Amino acid sequence: MAASENTTPRRHAIGEVLFRHETILLLVLIAEWFYFNSVGRRFGTLDNTFEIMRHSAEIGLLALVMTPIILTGGIDLSVGSLLGLCAILFGKLWRDAGMALPLAAGCTLLIGALAGGLNAVLIARLRLPALIVTLGTYSLFRGLAEAITRGVDTFTNFPDSFLALGQQHFAGLPTQVWFFLVVTVVIWLLVHRTTFGRSLRAIGFSPEGARYAGLPVERRIAQAYILAGVVSALAAIIYTARLGQAKADAGTGYELFAITAVVLGGTSIFGGVGTVHGTLFGVAAIAVLDNGLVHARQPREMAGMLTGVLLLAALGAGALPKLLAKLRGPRHSSAPPS
Amino acid sequence: MLRRFSRTGFQGGRAPPHSKTQAPNLLLRDFDLMQKYSREISVAIVLALLLLVMAIAAPAFYEPQPLLSRLAREAPTLIVACGVALVMVAREIDISIGSIFALCGVCAGLLAGSGWPLIAVCGVVVLIGAVLGAMNGALVAGLRLPSIVVTLATMVILREGLRWKQQGAFINLPDAWQWFGLSQRGGQWTLIACALILLAVLAWVSRNLAAGRFLYAVGSNAEAARLAGLRPRWITLAVFVFMGALAGLAALLNVVQSPQVDPKSGTGLELKAIAAAVVGGVAVSGGRGNLWGVFVGVLLLACINPALTYLHVEAYWEKAIQGAIILLAVIFDGLRNRRSTN
């Protein structure tokens, strides 16, 4: 959790394990798809596919930006609350301050960056544990949203041109999916094709080592949290457009879905290991499960339970080979769990 | 590390006899104690200031009956916060406690409804909590999975399973159950006494008994603890089992306060408990923390909402202020650590 904890080197061939993990997840996803397709009559239609995409865009965005953070060995519990705060500030700027919608959206993104910057300063500069800092801002952002709206105020009656962003199609896909795709591509390139991504992994493996290697550790960590703030604000705008209203409780619990999706996608919570496409598979697995169970006429609660079981199974599958090897071989002086 | 251990060793010893000839020593010792507990003391000072402000600005805050009710409502939180503080001292974390709490509450309601005697229900509910905790502990210690993810998964599984089973329906409790069959006043005093006795025992155990010191040893450096002959994984398992049992106990103390059991109770309890522990000076990186500090943290966070009400500030600010307090506490820690390392 604290970035400085992670100093034990990994002994496994990471590429191999990762390959296996994501393949399994993809197989699970395909199995889910075929099962629900055979059970639910309307499940496999294009409309329903679009519906799944539409509903998972916000959590997907949060999960995407959570990936770089978890890669550094950090965590961000505040993204869901920040989504709520940005949604109502967006409404406030538009309705009460009389801003044009594009300007209000721009300001909201700026606010997201500032809020992410608060996390960044506390975590990167003061070197406080990310879990606790974002627990504090989780409370703070939600509390500010509630205080600003006094718990009751909601923002509605957005113009249709804005609602189209969340409810209409553009060039054959739901409009928000285009935003999602752009963010996906950007973050995939950042994490997998730039030195930025490599330094995030290096920091996740060993912050001290990364520092000695001359990487700007503080700046990289700060950038990851600011990015999360900006994209949370974007998710807030999309959320508002999809539902047509902004309320203080928007995005409650989204941070847990996002973290679940990232970990399900094979990213190690201790940092250093993980991929963006793994996260995408994770988001898809959760979204398909959620939607498919409705079509299969199963209780909604089943989705949450199965997601939890899937998460434990994914973790267990990763841990099992290690355990078996240990049982078979003689006891080495292995590092204890941290 | 060495310093931390020598300090804690000192803290466990008996105080030297007070005498005039030892006055300089005594002063130094007091200064040392002040420094060691500066974190806990500063939170206590903040709490004292808040209470003082309330005494001047809104004396109605201290009316005995509402005050007693408020304290009784915080008794379960205190127990859970003590448990999570011990888990954090052992360098793990448990965010499934809110769900275990709710599940245990519902179990207590169902068992009581089907006519089980009170003692049996109490025993079984605490046992259920311990078993659920053992499940977490087995996954964390046995498979060496990260505790935050394991307990995230069990939190969701238990919470959703409970919602599936109960569909949000409340459970009526037999009349004899409320306040354990005592009068309201007597019941509230009993709850508070239970929580305080447990706190005192745990605080003493964690400082003076080997079992308590093991947690600090494992949380400070698990590998060193292993080389010293401890078995960190069994200790991790034990602390999760204990946490589960405490969550069950807290659920009992919560259930008896109202005529019905709310299956949604305990939502967000895990974050509240962790926040109280952090404000009280427990380090999430393990090996540091004091249960009396946690006590002060619980009281401080519990005071915010009533204080706002009595000061006629809108209660919507509660969460924001709570968040600000957590951030201030952790910033305080960060600045202090920085000074001590420089």
Image: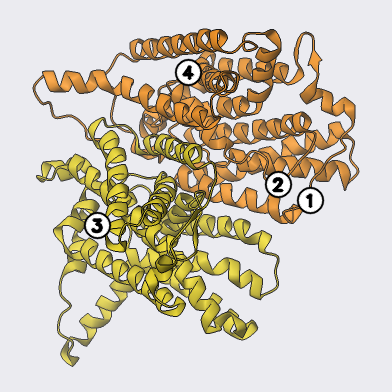
Which residue is tagged 4? A275
Circles 2, 4 touching at the beta carbon (< 8 Å): no
Quarter location, residue A321: top left
Along the line of sight, which residue is nearer the eye, A259 or A338? A259
Q: Which chain is yellow?
A: B
Q: Secondary structure at mark 4?
A: loop
Circles 3, 2 touching at the beta carbon (< 8 Å): no
The hue of chain A in the figure is orange
Circles 3, 4 touching at the beta carbon (< 8 Å): no
Tag 3 and tag 4 share a subunit = no
Along the line of sight, which residue is nearer the eye, A303 or B166? B166
In the rendered structure, which amino acid carries the disc numbered 2?
Ala
In the picture shown, does residue B248 fall above or below B59?
above
In the rendered structure, which amino acid carries the disc numbered 3?
Arg
**Where in the figure is residue B1, as x and y percent of width and height?**
24, 51
Q: Secondary structure at mark 1?
A: loop
Q: Which mark is residue A248?
A: 2
Which residue is tagged 3? B4
Tell me if A11 is positioned left or right of B269 in this view: left
Instruction: Say whether disc 2 or disc 4 marks the residue closer to the N-terminus.
Output: 2
Tag 1 and tag 3 share a subunit = no
- Residue B42 is at least partly visible in this image: no
- Nearer the observer, disc 1 or disc 4? 1
| x 70%, y 17%: residue | A177
In the rendered structure, which amino acid carries the disc numbered 1?
Asp
Which residue is tagged 1? A153
Structural crowding at the residue carrying mark 3, measured as other residues with C-alpha within 10 Å and reported as few (<14), some (14–19) or many (≥20): some
